[in-house]
Amino acid sequence: RTHWPVQMKDSVQWGDQDAFMHINNTQYFRWWESAHIVYLQKLGIFKNANATDPKGAIIARSECHFLRPLTFPDEVTVMCRCSSIGNTSINVEYLLKNQHDEDCAKGTATLVLFDYIANKKYPVDDEMRKIISDLENGKE
């Protein structure tokens, strides 16, 4: 598979570095979160990306495999796509590339759909499954 429905560019900031002069591992999870928020917005949920949204998703699990260190200055491309769909969750995968198009990190997450008004998770319905299928097949 080569298609990534979400591809975001971001500049590496000097302040993202730690004492060892490479980008701190927490920044990768911030990039993951930003990418999957865009993905969720393409699904029609989490449109405001804040507490005013009646429906969104909660991160149940997230991981990162660090492949190559990043340093300042650099520009990264953060990519996100769906890897599988559960009853109430969406599993996503991430890829982060540097300005030289080298893979620097890969990750995954499980996003549980959550209704903040009812205070409970909710199912991935047929309409959302269709939207995901269209996104993953380049029919945006």
Image: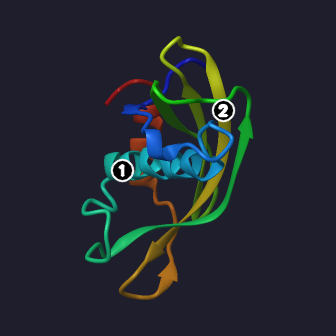
Residue 99: numbered disc: none
Q: Position of residue 6 (x, y in %)?
A: 41, 34
Q: How many marks do you count on the picture?
A: 2
Q: Residue at x 36, y 46 (%)?
A: 38
The alpha-carbon separation of the residues under discs 1 and 2 comes to: 25 Å
Q: Which residue is mark 2?
A: 105
Q: Position of residue 80 (x, y in %)?
A: 51, 37
Q: Position of residue 131 (x, y in %)?
A: 39, 43
Q: Residue at x 45, y 39 (%)?
A: 14
The amino acid pointed to by label 1 is Leu
Crowding at dot 2, Cα within 10 Å, few <14 / some 14-19 / many 20+, comes out as: some
Q: Residue furthest front?
A: 19
Q: Please identify the quarter of the rendering in which residue 53 is found.
A: bottom left
In the picture shown, does residue 71 fall above or below 41? Answer: above
Q: Which residue is mark 1?
A: 43
Residue 85 shown left or right of residue 73 in the figure: right
Quarter of the image with the C terminus is: top left
Q: Position of residue 111 (x, y in %)?
A: 57, 60
